[in-house]
Amino acid sequence: TQKIKINQSVRSLFWLSLIIFLGCLIFLILMLYQFPSHDYYFLDTFFLPVLLLLILSISLIPDKYSKHSAHAVAGVVIGFIFIHHASNLQQQRKSTDHWDTIAATTRNFTNSSVYLSELDISNDSKILVFGAYAPNIPFILMNRKGYAVMAADRKIIQKALSWDFDFVIIQNEFFLPDIYSVYPEILSQISKKWDNGRISICQRNYTDTVQTITQFLGLENQTPLLEEFFDYESAQKPGWENIKSTTEKIYSGNHSGKITEDMEYGLTFKTSNLTAIENRHSFLLLEAFLLQEVPGNVEMIASISANGENVFYKSYHLGNFLNQQNTWENVNLVFSFPPVKSSDYEFAVYVLNSGKKSFYIDDFKFSMY
């Protein structure tokens, strides 16, 4: 066998590549918490060492093979593989759906600059934007300045409302699931002034008036797409499943529902006859009364499956809402749904007893708009 002769240039390239690669490994360890959320940091970090390694590998090909253009062939083959993979990956990255908050934010704030100008909101106004998942996009499209709140966190929302702002702007499709659900007190601190169907423009509320969610959303005179109520006073109603009534503990009437330890699923409602949610955003307001004797892991879930696959699934862990034992507690939840793009679908709302504890439920109702 003939040994490959390595000249000084290749040796220098090897040591340079090794030093850079070790430095990148140290950076990788320091950035482990960031890489899962920002994979492009990872790509940028290792682009140079991988490129140097590729150059080093090609340089090790013996000279006698280079006469047959081995370097060129290797470069073309590797380049083609990389380009093909990158092209497929870019197509995946550019695809959007209801989960793409950046695409939704861009869509919601498109032409917002003109809309704000029509409302005589000056360019000098300070705007507080909740749900600014890509914080620069709203302000570029509004041509305004202000503050961006990215995190749907109770303490952050509460603090932001104490800042010096002229208007609050909220994306309608994110208000219920991301803001109101974690900080319902916001209804007493801001009042909606204008709404173009995509964004709501609000101002600070200086009165003592407390709004309901239906008043804030302007739903008092709207007819719900679907409205259901189950109080366990009847044995069965169309669409309802997993009904087990009891007289042991009652919130109202003569009966309540009991979810026992051996029941994985509690009260459930399902329907496939709700064409009003096709090709449009919708949301659901849910209220129920629950009593737990022993703290357990209980979830309230809303889902939409289309063509045999989940297109929406949202779960609330009720342990975040139930604070007492042997006491009836009121739970209010909000679900925001994407447009359903198929006529073959099923909508469901149900209780999941994932903690396998017994508890009671009564006066379960919801309205979809």
Image (cartoon, rainbow, N blue to C red):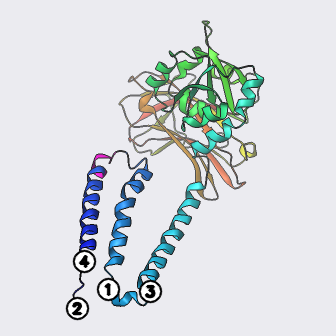
**Residue type highlighted by circle 2:** Gln
Residue 64 lies in the magenta stretch: no
Label 1, on which residue? 62
Specify the quadrant that holds the N terminus.
bottom left
Mark 4 or 3: the one toward you: 4
Viewer-proximal residue, 198 or 135?
Answer: 135
Viewer-proximal residue, 318 or 358?
Answer: 318
Q: Are marks 2 and 4 in contact (CB under 8 Å)?
A: no
Mark 4 or 1: the one toward you: 4
Distance, label 2 to label 3, CA atoms, is: 20 Å
What residue lies at 40% left-to-right and 36% top-to-bottom? Answer: 358
Label 2, on which residue? 2
For marks 4 and 1 on the same chain, the one whose residue lies earlier in the sequence: 4
Viewer-proximal residue, 44 or 332?
Answer: 44
Label 3, on which residue? 69
| Residue 7 marker | 4
Specify the quadrant that holds the C terminus.
top right
Distance, label 2 to label 4, CA atoms, is: 15 Å
Few, some or many C-alpha atoms within 10 Å of disc 4 (few <14, some 14-19, many ≥20)?
Answer: few
For marks 1 and 2 on the same chain, the one whose residue lies earlier in the sequence: 2
Q: Are marks 3 and 1 in contact (CB under 8 Å)?
A: no
Distance, label 4 to label 3, CA atoms, is: 20 Å
Q: Which residues are magenta?
A: 28-33
Assign a secondary structure to mark 3.
Answer: loop
**Residue type highlighted by circle 3:** Ser
Residue 337 in sight from this viewpoint: no
For marks 3 and 1 on the same chain, the one whose residue lies earlier in the sequence: 1
